[in-house]
């Protein structure tokens, strides 16, 4: 909480600084408003949740990238973004792993800097703690392995929303977007080629070991053989023929992530003044297998932003259907915006990898933003309150897989940038 309040404080200083700069240092009279939401409290709030960390990181990245463009120009900012991606992409990936442990009241340390072995770690967890989690809650233990890739996947979807709905420029986010796509594709795509992956030996001190090792290999081994003698670092050579086929399945399906309307204009099917429609596909793993998304973005009259998706889950051999729809940032009255989202799913019963029985479930969230502070420059700040409820089930970025009622509290800084470069 202390770190998050510091983050909000820094944003507040930057917010005031932007207010002071608008008269002197900007070159054009065109005002472009950018919104930077910051989640202060999320449920369960023992520490950052996956949604909270991803959202706050993305807001910070966007704001400081724009400030960098003002000060250093577009070319130098892109160079900064290129180098920073070496640190920031492992950061959010490892925080995805860490957030699952924290949701189970298990302390851990994230070390997102790539080490001499070519890997970043979440560490500080004993073998006995992980063994107990595997015995008592296998789906959550498996999700420890998939959560980093899940976080990467959801970061891409957040950037899709911002760009397609015109809330951020592609120019500002394309370096981040491209590197995250490459990171996700390479993790899955290189998995069937063990010589291209770092081979890890478990450290003598168990507290210095990464919690899961190779995400894909560890996931697949524990899906097929949950009662195998415990060890953390699974190599490709440890996998059976059937397990290696599943690894190949993840590599092939991960290519669906390439079909993004951000980079392929034909996927922006309708681009008219009063109606825009874009489609895309996506893929990542789940605690019981994996899933494929077909995503739709629709904007009507530049006022109604709809996000829809159809999702096909698969465990070992059985497909299950899900989907969702959301209304994004709809202005009810001048000072109040809302976002409303609903999800439904049929998932493997008890998250079982082998079952053909499904279990119905769903989730809903309503989010309000109330503009509390307005300034003559166009800057403003809103107070944000969200309520969400879900039944038992897996929902990407939601760390709790049991039935859950949660509250989300934050602020949004709406800053007027006078910069032609971000149009």
Image (cartoon, rainbow, N blue to C red):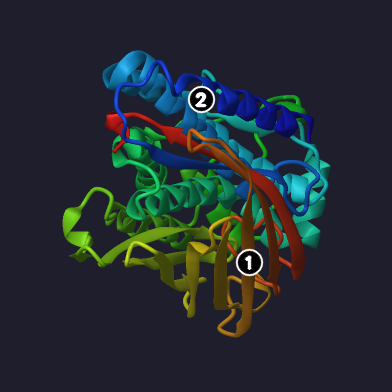
- The image shows residue 374 at horizontal and vertical percentages of 58, 41
| Between 396 and 409, the one nearer to me in the picture | 409
Residue at the (47%, 76%) spot, across then down:
317
Q: Position of residue 420 (x, y in %)?
A: 28, 31
The numbered mark, 2 or 1, whose residue comes first in the sequence reads 2
- Give the residue displayed 36% in from the left and 46% down from the top: 185
Q: Is residue 163 above or below residue 88?
A: below
Dividing the picture into quarters, in which one does residue 40 lie?
A: top right
Outermost residue to the left? 266
For the question of whether residue 217 can be seen, the reply is no
Does the CB distance between marks 2 and 1 fall below 8 Å?
no
Residue at left offset 62%, top offset 39%: 95
- Crowding near the residue tagged with mark 2, few <14, some 14–19, many ≥20 C-alpha atoms within 10 Å: some
Q: Nearer the viewer, residue 304 or 211?
A: 304
Left or right: 83 as drawn, with respect to 5: left
Please give the label number shown on residue 277.
none
Q: Is residue 220 left or right of residue 276?
A: right
Q: Which residue is mark 2?
A: 18
Find numbered disc 2 in the image and state the secondary structure of the residue it sits on.
helix
Q: Residues within 10 Å of mark 1 (few under 14, many from 20)?
A: some
State the image coordinates of residue 370 (x, y, percent, origin top left).
64, 54
The residue mark sitting in front, 2 or 1, is: 2
- Quadrant of the rendering where the N terminus is positioned: top right
Q: Is residue 380 above or below residue 286?
A: above
Q: Which mark is residue 366?
A: 1
Looking at the rendered structure, the secondary structure element under dot 1 is strand
Point out residue 362 in the picture as x, y percentages from the top left corner: 62, 76
Image quarter where the C terminus lies is top left
Of 340 and 235, the residue lying toward us: 340
């Amino acid at each position: 909480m202390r770190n998050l309040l510091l983050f909000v404080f820094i944003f507040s200083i930057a917010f005031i600084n932007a207010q002071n700069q608008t008269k002197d240092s900007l070159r054009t009279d065109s005002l472009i408003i950018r919104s930077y939401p910051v989640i202060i409290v999320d449920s369960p709030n023992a520490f950052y949740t996956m949604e909270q960390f991803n959202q706050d990181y993305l807001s910070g990245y966007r704001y400081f990238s724009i400030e960098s463009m003002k000060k250093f120009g577009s070319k130098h900012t892109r160079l900064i973004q290129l180098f920073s991606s070496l640190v920031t992409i492992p950061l959010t990936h490892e925080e995805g792993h860490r957030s699952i442990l924290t949701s189970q009241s298990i302390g851990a340390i994230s070390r997102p800097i790539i080490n001499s072995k070519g890997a970043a770690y979440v560490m500080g967890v004993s073998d006995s703690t992980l063994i107990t989690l595997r015995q008592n809650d296998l789906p959550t233990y498996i999700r420890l392995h998939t959560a980093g890739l899940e976080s990467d996947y959801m970061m891409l979807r957040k950037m899709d929303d911002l760009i397609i709905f015109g809330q951020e420029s592609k120019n500002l986010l394309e370096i981040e977007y491209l590197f995250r796509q490459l990171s996700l594709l390479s993790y899955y795509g290189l998995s069937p080629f063990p010589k291209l992956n770092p081979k890890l030996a478990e450290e003598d001190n168990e507290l210095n070991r990464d919690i899961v090792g190779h995400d894909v290999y560890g996931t697949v081994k524990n899906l097929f053989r949950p009662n195998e003698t415990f060890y953390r670092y699974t190599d490709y050579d440890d996998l059976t023929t059937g397990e290696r086929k599943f690894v190949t399945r993840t590599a092939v399906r991960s290519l669906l992530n390439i079909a993004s309307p951000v980079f392929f204009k034909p996927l922006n099917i309708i681009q008219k003044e009063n109606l825009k429609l874009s489609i895309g596909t996506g893929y990542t793993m789940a605690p019981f297998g994996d899933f494929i998304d077909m995503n739709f973005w629709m904007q009507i009259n530049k006022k109604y932003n709809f996000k829809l998706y159809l999702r096909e889950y698969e465990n070992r051999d059985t497909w299950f259907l899900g989907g969702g729809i959301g209304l994004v940032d709809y202005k009810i009255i001048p000072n109040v915006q809302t976002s409303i989202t609903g999800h439904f799913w049929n998932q493997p019963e008890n998250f079982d990898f082998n079952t053909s029985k499904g279990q119905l479930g769903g989730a809903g969230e309503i989010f309000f933003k109330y503009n509390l502070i307005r300034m003559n420059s166009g800057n403003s700040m809103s107070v944000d309150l969200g309520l969400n409820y879900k039944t038992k089930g897996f929902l990407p970025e939601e760390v709790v897989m049991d039935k859950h009622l949660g509250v989300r509290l934050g602020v949004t800084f709406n800053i007027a940038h006078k910069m032609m470069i971000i149009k």
